[in-house]
Image (cartoon, rainbow, N blue to C red):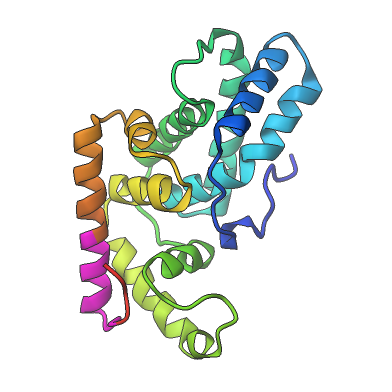
Amino acid sequence: MPPLHDPGAAHLSARPIDDEGDELDRRLLARAAQGDRRAFDELVERHSDALFRFLRMLLHRDEAAEDALQETWIAVHRAAADYRGEGRFVSWLFTIARHRALRQLDARPTTPVDEASLDTLGLEAGWGEPGDPESLASEAERAERLRAALEALGAEDRAVLVLHDLEGLSGPESAEVLGLSLAATKSRLHRARLRLLAELRSRGVRDARS
């Protein structure tokens, strides 16, 4: 099966879904539940890139993330008729994706973080924009340091960073996906940011923002 996502999307900034976009997602899902294939395909097109970024950050490998992505959409299709509209569609969607990723994580040991995932977190850590000559000069060194820093974080720390800081989910939405209270999610996000920052600084990155 061909990839469901744009291979270059891991380098793109997240585009949070607004209320109008959420309403469109709900309408598309309702139509998909009634057998409208075009509506389902539009949902896949709208959200696969963001889902793939999230899954690859958790699973580290393109093949594993692609498998989890396909499993996610299969589960969405099967559950479409049961969606009750509690909370935003994207929260429900990422919850399904997270469960698929955790199944894979339970079945295998942790593997290295891939290069494509590093670029986006590098920006969030406070490094320059893509194309900045000063940033490009030390790109390989920074990527290696970020790789090591991320290896020190647990999967759930990576998950909350991706959901909230990269994909733009709100605190309550991130909490719903992670299965935590809002207070616990805020605490985990704060700790994850501090841990990543500390790991980066321990590896010589001095320009990272807190």
Quick check: 55 left or right of 165?
right
Tag count in the figure?
0
Q: Nearer the viewer, residue 50 or 107?
A: 50
Q: Quadrant of the N terminus?
A: top right
In depth, the one of 75 and 49 nearer the eye is 49
- The image position of residue 102, as x and y in percent, is 38, 36
Q: Residue at x 59, y 44 (%)?
A: 66
Does residue 165 appear to the left or right of 54 in the view shown?
A: left
195 or 27, which is in the foreground?
A: 27
Left or right: 204 as drawn, with respect to 101: left
Image coordinates for residue 72, horizontal then vertical, percent: 55, 30
Question: From which residue to which does the magenta span run?
Answer: 194-206
Is 198 inside the magenta-drawn segment? yes
Q: Residue at x 57, y 76 (%)?
A: 130
Side of 40 relative to 128 (left or right): right
Residue shown at the point (59%, 59%) measured from the top left = 12
Percent of width and height locating residue 46:
67, 38
Would you identify the image quadrant in which residue 69 lies? top right
Q: Residue at x 52, y 75 (%)?
A: 129
Along the line of sight, which residue is nearer the eye, 93 or 56?
93
Q: Main secondary structure of the magenta part?
A: helix
* Magenta span includes 22: no
Q: Quadrant of the C terminus?
A: bottom left
Residue 15 in the image: x percent, y percent?
A: 57, 49
